[in-house]
Image: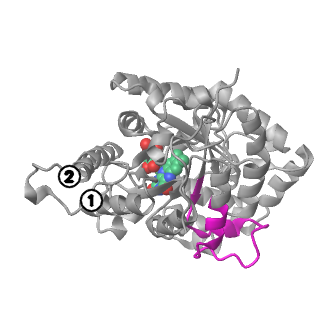
Amino acid sequence: MSTPFRLMQFTAFSPGAWERLDAVNGYDWTRAETQKEMLRILEKAGYESVMFADTLAIGTLYGGNTDALVKLGMGEGFHNDPVAMMTALSRATQRIGLVCTLSASLYPTELLAQTLSSLDHMTRGRIGWNIVTSMGKDAAANYGITEFPSSQERYDRAAELIEQADKLWSYVQDADPAERLNIPGMPQGRPAIMQAGGSGPGKDFAAKHADGILAHRNSPEDMKVFRDDIRARAEKFGRDPDSLNLFFTCTPVIAGSQEEAAAMREQALQSPTKTIEAGLVNFSLRIGLDVSKFPVDEPLPEGVEIQGSQGVLDQHTESAAPTLREIAVSENLKETFAVQGTAVEVADRLEEVMNIAGGDGIAVRGGLLPANIIPMATQVVPILRERGLVRSTYRFPTFRQNLTDADFVASGGSVSPVTTVRSEK
Ligand SMILES: Cc1cc2nc3c(=O)[nH]c(=O)nc-3n(C[C@H](O)[C@H](O)[C@H](O)COP(=O)(O)O)c2cc1C
């Protein structure tokens, strides 16, 4: 029998949506209106949360400059701060979790604790923190940091930051007055902690601290290896592995038939922002290595040293040896494991993948645009719901309670809510 799983949307407050050839006419990514509308649809479909990525620089890694990124008009390079978007989205919805990416390497502790606390109040207990260690030297330079710390040092700093922030959030009455900030206790006590690092230090950090973990893995078998690894690490640190949830990313292509879905995939690659060069720019920025100097029809040489995400490098190379061209296509389409076809076929595939991987959730990638959101939320989710595989209601008022609900798997999210949803004007 299949086990119920969770759904989230992984997106960004960025012009990435422009890259879809079927994007809404006149779409203005800097305004919240479309995003708000899409979020209401996701909430109706019972998505656990929506997570907003963020980066803090226009990367210069590929070829040593920003030329390709700017020439190609790649949406990935540009972001508005997700914090601003959260307050708008909180007014449009009542239960869905809102996850904000904030850099542990570049935010001062007090500012970070104050910001997340205020957001948790504004959203009435629905804030999650995607704690990233920031991948690039460019971001560090923008924040006046010239010595870029190692991956281990960055995760050590992130752990220290959580500890310090927890102290500020708990507002211990007998603490040294000099250590007390003017932060009112927040509805969730602390935000739900999300994490997406895939290196050894990253996985250890997640196993110790995270409520939810995101990963890109290119096959269900690789997903299972990743999940088993994280769960073993959690046990080693004395944590119940069932208290953390893994979310594996994918980009479903939903159409009237397999042929139509294949044609849509091909069409997406025709966008001027989806050239092989664009895919290589993305890959370079994510792994922190200029891949422009390597032959495009060969795999990346073994043993190359990277400054960025080990998790992303492993995603592509841990059980396959794709050429850089193949990696570029996968990066352009934000593909991980293949999932395409009719709504029933996509539902079947997600069920199958979750069964092989062992659970716990799927993170759908894509901007908050109708073409990305509506087919999945209104065609595939009802099928999954009918099979008792995804939640039909939010049991608790806060995001962290819903995310860590120990009864979720037993109930498939279909139990009655503990509190009723209060309607907001
Ligand atoms: C699904 C996913 C989402 C991520 N989102 C962001 C992001 O929004 N901003 C960012 O700076 N890093 C992001 N990262 C990078 C990771 O948080 C992490 O910093 C990076 O993978 C380096 O760590 P690693 O070497 O442990 O993999 C993301 C990674 C993954 C897998």
Secondary structure of residue under mark 2: loop
Q: Nearer the viewer, residue 398 or 421?
A: 421
Q: Is residue 259 above or below residue 405?
A: below
The mark nearer the N terminus, 2 or 1, is: 2
Quarter of the picture holding the N terminus? top right
| Res 349 seen here | yes
Lateral position of residue 149 relative to residue 18, left or right: left
Q: CA distance from mark 2 to mark 1?
A: 8 Å
Magenta stretch: give its range: 10-39
Secondary structure of residue under mark 1: loop
Q: Is residue 253 above or below residue 356?
A: below
Q: Residues within 10 Å of mark 2 (few under 14, many from 20)?
A: some
Q: Residue at x 17, y 48 (%)?
A: 172
> Magenta segment: does it hold 399?
no
User: Residue 381: x and y, percent?
Assistant: 73, 44
**The residue at label 2 has a CB less than 8 Å from ligand 1:** no
User: Residue 361: x and y, percent?
Assistant: 59, 37
Q: Amino acid at mark 2?
A: Tyr
Query: Label 1 belongs to which residue?
Result: 184
> Magenta segment: does it hold 37?
yes
Q: Are marks 2 and 1 in contact (CB under 8 Å)?
A: yes
Residue 171 has which mark?
2
User: Residue 255: x and y, percent?
Assistant: 86, 50
Q: Residue at x 62, y 60 (%)?
A: 39
Lateral position of residue 314 relative to residue 387, left or right: left
Q: Residue at x 75, y 41 (%)?
A: 339
**The residue at label 1 has a CB less than 8 Å from ligand 1:** no
Q: Amino acid at mark 1?
A: Pro
